[in-house]
Image: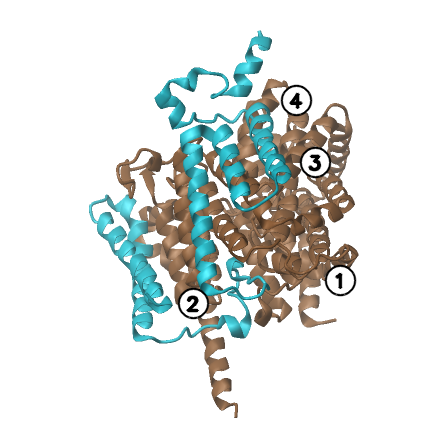
Amino acid sequence: MTFKRSLGWLILLTVLAAWIILAQGMAGKIGAASLEGLVRVFSWPAFGYLLLGNLIGFAVGMLPGLGGPVTMALMLGFAFQLKMDAVEAFSFLLGMMAVTATTGDITSILFGIPGEGSTASTIVEGHPMAKKGEAGRALGASLMSSLMGALIGAGAIAVAIPIVTPLVLALGTPEFFMLTVAGVTFVGALSGGSVIKGLAAGGLGFIFSLVGLDMQTATERYTFGTMYLWGGGETGGAGIGLVPATVGLFAIPEIIDLATKGGSIAQAHVGRLGGVFQGVKDALRHWWLVARCSAMGTYIGIIPGMGGPVSQWVAYAHAMQSSGKQDQVGTGVIEGVLGPGAANNSTLGGALIPTIAFGIPGNVTTAILLGAFLVLGLRPGTSMLTKDLDVTFSLVWVLVVSNVITVSVCFLFLNQLARLTRIKGTLLIPPLLLFIYLGSYTHTNSFGDIIVTLIFGALGWLMVVFDWSRPALLLGLVLGRLADNYLWISYSRYEFGFLARPGVLIILGVIVMSIAYPLIKNRGRGRSAEAAP
Amino acid sequence: MSFRGLSIAFTGGLFLMMVWALWEAFGWELQASLMAWLIGLPTAALLAAQLARELAGRPEKAVAPDEDGPGLLDASLVEREAEPLDPAEERRRTARIIAWILGFAAAIWLLGFQFGIGLAALLYLKCAGEKWLAVIGITVAVLAGVVLVFDCGMHIFFAEGKLFTWSGLSTSPLFNGFCYQVTSPFKG
């Protein structure tokens, strides 16, 4: 057994021991609530709503741009119109959300367009596999790792209930600020093309996130006097909506590429999907990687404001680094499919933990879900951890059951899904443009969303042409508004003294290492190249 | 202009944009400008360094795409393994698809989603040389998706096309909120 694996087991056993100590007083109650939650999920009409939610989530996940949060917001009213009780409403809403990342991976692999914002990283290795004729294997690996990730994420809620408080409270606002910077730096520094370009792209993303009306000071930041850019979208008041920007950055360049190169998405022959089970075997063979990436996804999900868009990239970077195949990036490395697949599915479970425990939503989805909690008369915190513990456990079961159902359905229809890659590019472009424009339009139901998509599409295409990192820019945009808030709170409390906090210094050290590592690596590579005869 | 010249222009444009962003932040209160300064200054420095490197003609120090494949974390650089295209033909195709992307947006703006996307899809497919069966099939599928799924199913509010607003046709159920207006008499 390797040292790394031994260390992993040691950590796992320590956490387990801590959990047993903390949970020993709650064991009976947890067991009863868990069973009650399971029965309620399988009762009628809750199970019917769960299936309906799964169906909508399946479609929404596959549609580029039409993200889960937007759909959840749209469906929220529908849930209340039908006068659903708490478990029915969560079976429907959470059942819908639970599967979007799973089916979003399918679109990412087959079309090279992120079905969900949280599945963009799956494109990097998954889409090249589809183009090599290994769509089945990539899908099999992605689905299996998604299922494992979702189960681990759901399990994390149950496990975390007794121990969650010290985990989240250990970090303060300055550390959260540094974590957002660290997230962007990791992605920027690992952009491959150039560390400078990667970091600059992340910085640009941060600046783009400032566009809009600053709610605290009523300052118009880079709005050009336009009301549309005042914001109020899902990025918490930011003027540039995440959905139109993401769709523009990633989908428009892919459409241009598809139309320019011609042919079908799969340049090579898409073989019979015998490779599906090879993908499943890949996931099982790399179970420790899947478990690690699921744990990362869960933990990142716990941190407010982070979530699928961050966890997928962190998991991807970890998967590639630990695979030792950094020199094969973008060529269809299976580990690069397994890591993000697991992480983006476990994130929802993690994000639900602070939502249930403290009423602090981990991401946009759980923020909307928090609204549903309150409307349905549920109070996050003590109430959901004691009186309504069965409802809390019903959330866990919804995640589990939804993913089992969806992954099973996906396996049944994989042949048909993989054949989509052989459709002629020209036939795909009109429906894809429909989803691109419709997906971005649903952000604020304004033509301004389409203009933002076009602007970011142009930027994304130029970044592709000149080899700049789009994910770094996107991550800066995602985390920027949050970082802005954390920064101001930290500054107003400690001024610049917050930079001397131990937690901040540790994260800063990690940031410096993440920047230095590729530079040192390249220098070493340069020297060995010079030394070569 | 050469590829290098275009690359320098792009980096220069980003640098100028960042300088402008910092300049704009001058007049803001500290709370609004702190982030812009803290992140903007190092970003501007990085962009200036990159611009200087490109102007000096220094090659990228990091992993070269031909050596290590596409850049880590950037899906865009995944090259299709098709036969290499003639550069002039590639430029023509790129210009054509960009025009179509803008054309679809213009059609939506002028005619609204229901009609704009349908008309643009029909024209695009016909211009791409597809057979009528495929043209009509895809166009109908696209229209059905807009009307049945998004309008009737998800009740997304579609803004009316500017042409209908200008011509006064926007009150017709055919041109605005088709699903809602058709089904509303039955809702009591």
Asked whether residue A20 appears in the rendered view, the answer is: no
* Circle 4 chain: A
Chain A visual colour: brown
Question: Badge 1 is on which residue?
Answer: A285
- Please state which of the two labelled residues, at mark 4 or mark 1, is closer to the viewer: 1
Tell me what residue is drawn at x 66 percent, y 54 percent.
A15
Q: Is residue A394 above or below residue A19?
A: above
Q: Which chain is cyan?
A: B
Question: Badge 2 is on which residue?
Answer: A195
Tell me residue A300's x, y (percent).
Answer: 55, 50
Earlier along the polypeptide chain: callout 4 or callout 3?
4
Question: Badge 3 is on which residue?
Answer: A398
Question: Badge 4 is on which residue?
Answer: A85
Asked whether residue A75 appears in the rendered view, the answer is: yes
- Please state which of the two labelled residues, at mark 4 or mark 2, is closer to the viewer: 2
Disc 4 element = loop
Distance between the alpha carbons at the discs numbered 4 and 3: 15 Å
Task: Check disc 4 and give the amino acid type.
Answer: Asp
Distance between the alpha carbons at the discs numbered 2 and 3: 42 Å
Earlier along the polypeptide chain: callout 4 or callout 2?
4
Tell me what residue is drawn at x 24 percent, y 52 percent.
B20
Disc 3 element = helix
Question: Are the two marked residues, 4 and 1, in contact with CB atoms closer than 8 angstroms?
Answer: no
